[in-house]
Amino acid sequence: MDNKYGSRINDNHFIAELVKEYGFKFTKTQQNSEHIHKCIIEKALQFEKDYFKGFNVYTNFSQTLSSKLLDGKVIIQPNIAHITSTVNKSSHRNNKNQK
């Protein structure tokens, strides 16, 4: 699909293909991953390994994060810098008449 659409996911034809040919649904609930896997394997068996590599990125991340949280290890909080500065700006006013 990369050769056909590049890295765009906002292409209407790409979205239509995902729904019509690969089993994705417009829903706010979880997708039927078993049905999607079946469609992928039927259409492009040679890309099954690449598909599962991408599909499992989220799962692997979630499992790693969960294990860190359950181990009680401290997760380092990000340092957020709030930069404030004051700049004296010169005025373009005519100050001759002001005292």
Image: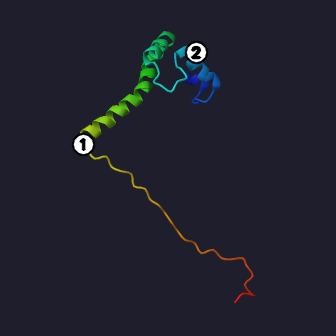
In this view, which residue lies farthest toward the front? 28
Q: Label 1 amino acid?
A: Gly
The percent position of residue 34, horizontal first and vertical second, equals: 42, 15
- Please tell me whether mark 1 sits on a helix, a strand or a loop: loop
The percent position of residue 49, horizontal first and vertical second, equals: 42, 19
Disc assigned to residue 23 = none
Q: What residue do we see at 39% from left, 51% from top?
A: 78
**Residue marked by disc 1:** 72
Q: Label 2 amino acid?
A: Lys
The percent position of residue 42, horizontal first and vertical second, equals: 48, 9
Q: Work out how far the residue at label 2 is from the one at label 1, CA to CA, in angstroms.
A: 44 Å
Where is the C terminus found, in terms of image quarters? bottom right
Q: Which mark is first along the chain, 1 or 2?
A: 2
Q: What residue do we see at 25% from left, 44% from top?
A: 73
In this view, which residue lies farthest toward the bottom? 99
Q: Is residue 39 above or below residue 79?
A: above
30 sits to left or right of 73: right
Q: Is residue 53 above or below residue 94?
A: above
Q: How is the image coloured?
A: rainbow
The percent position of residue 82, horizontal first and vertical second, equals: 47, 61
74 sits to left or right of 30: left
Q: Quadrant of residue 91?
A: bottom right
Q: Is residue 33 above or below residue 89?
A: above
Q: What residue do we see at 52% from left, 16% from top?
A: 23
Quick one: label 1, few (<14), some, or many (20+) residues within 10 Å?
Answer: few
Q: What residue do we see at 50% from left, 27% from top?
A: 28
**Residue marked by disc 2:** 20
Tell which of 22 and 3 is nearer to you: 22
